[in-house]
Image (cartoon, helix red, strand yellow):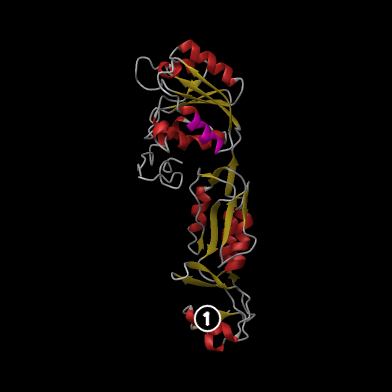
Amino acid sequence: MKKISIDNAEGQVLAYDITEVSLEKKIKNRAFKRGHVICADDIEYMKNLGRRNIFVMDGNDTDVHEDDAAKMAAPLAAGENVTYDKETSEGKVSFYAEIDGVFHVDREKLLAVNSLEIPSMPTLHDGFPVKKGAQVAAFRIIPLVCTEELMNSVRSILDKPILSVNPYKIKTACILVTGNEVYEGRIKEGFIPKLSAKLNAMGVEVVATAVAPDDREHITGELKKMLELTDLVLTTGGTSVDPDDVTTDAIKDAGVQIICKGNPIQPGNNCSIGYIGEKTVVCVPAAALFFHATALDIYLPKILAQEKITKEFIANSGHGGLCHFCEKCHYPVCPFGRGGL
């Protein structure tokens, strides 16, 4: 590349994308693409964009251009269920989820790439739930060109893909509501529609529901029937500290091993998770009725992707596990629960 005055640019080949930023037009996009042959009409337009000098191709480039650097890195970084732009824009390539699931990134290798200084590779948080088509990462080099040596360093770090999406594997669930007040019709049941909507939004069909009184044997019996139907059962009620709260004990009677009673996330401290073989049982606390996002929402994507919830993971979820209680909830696009991922 060589730098020339914009007044002498007619007939020259543009060596990089030129961006237009306009608050009036409410745009920030590519105005001219690399390889564009500059004509007389372009010169005034480029001056309006603040250009007095530009870079054009001179046929003597030995370094790696920003577009080529992005195209080199993209297939090395993209792993399972991650796709990427086949053409760059402004020297950048973006990565996207091919399916609904849990996004993962190798944080050590990501740090190594970004520690090279010239590359820029931002990603979503590791463990973030994503929808098909969601952007999960991007790559570019910050200057227009870099050395082949630097790109060799990138290749060395990206010796295997570092971006992936783990799909949701659990496709059905059951909901077991417990509580004398609901069983006897004293209050209206509200968990089933709310939890069903939450599960449906993540591609999970609710195949059975039931309401049980605060009777240990009754709850155990209903739970065992549900565990024959599906790999996930959500139970509600009877998980707090009242003397009538027998749900957790009834779950244990069914052979479920509870990882730990409760968790450090608020709201949703009384959400507990247990396993019986490969099947998962979640005790959903009353907080899930009143808040858009609770501990259940932090753990559920990982559960649906059949990623084992460990005692250590639950303990770590306390970091960032305090909701900001915003007037309008934007979860999952917020910091709630991200510190422990």
Q: From this viewpoint, is residue 17 visible?
A: no
Please state which of residues 198 and 314 is positioned toward the viewer in this rendering.
198
Q: Position of residue 87 (x, y in %)?
A: 63, 64
Please state which of residues 309 and 291 is positioned toward the viewer in this rendering.
291
Q: Amino acid at mark 1?
A: Tyr
Taking the image as shown, residue 152 lies to the left or right of residue 339, namely: right
Taking the image as shown, residue 263 lies to the left or right of residue 307, namely: left
Q: Is 83 a magenta residue?
A: no
Which residue corresponds to the image point at 56% horizontal and 51% vertical from the top-left?
134
Q: From this viewpoint, is residue 178 visible?
A: yes
Residue 148, compared with residue 155, is above or below; it is: below
Please state which of residues 310 and 196 is positioned toward the viewer in this rendering.
196
Q: Quadrant of the N terminus?
A: bottom right
Quarter-wise, where is residue 272 in the image?
A: top left
Q: Position of residue 299 (x, y in %)?
A: 48, 35
Q: Is 194 a magenta residue?
A: yes
Q: Position of residue 92 (x, y in %)?
A: 56, 63
Which residue is labeled 1 in the image? 45
Magenta stretch: helix, strand or loop mostly: helix
Which residue corresponds to the image point at 62% horizontal and 66% vertical from the top-left?
68
Segment tinted magenta in the rendering: 193-201
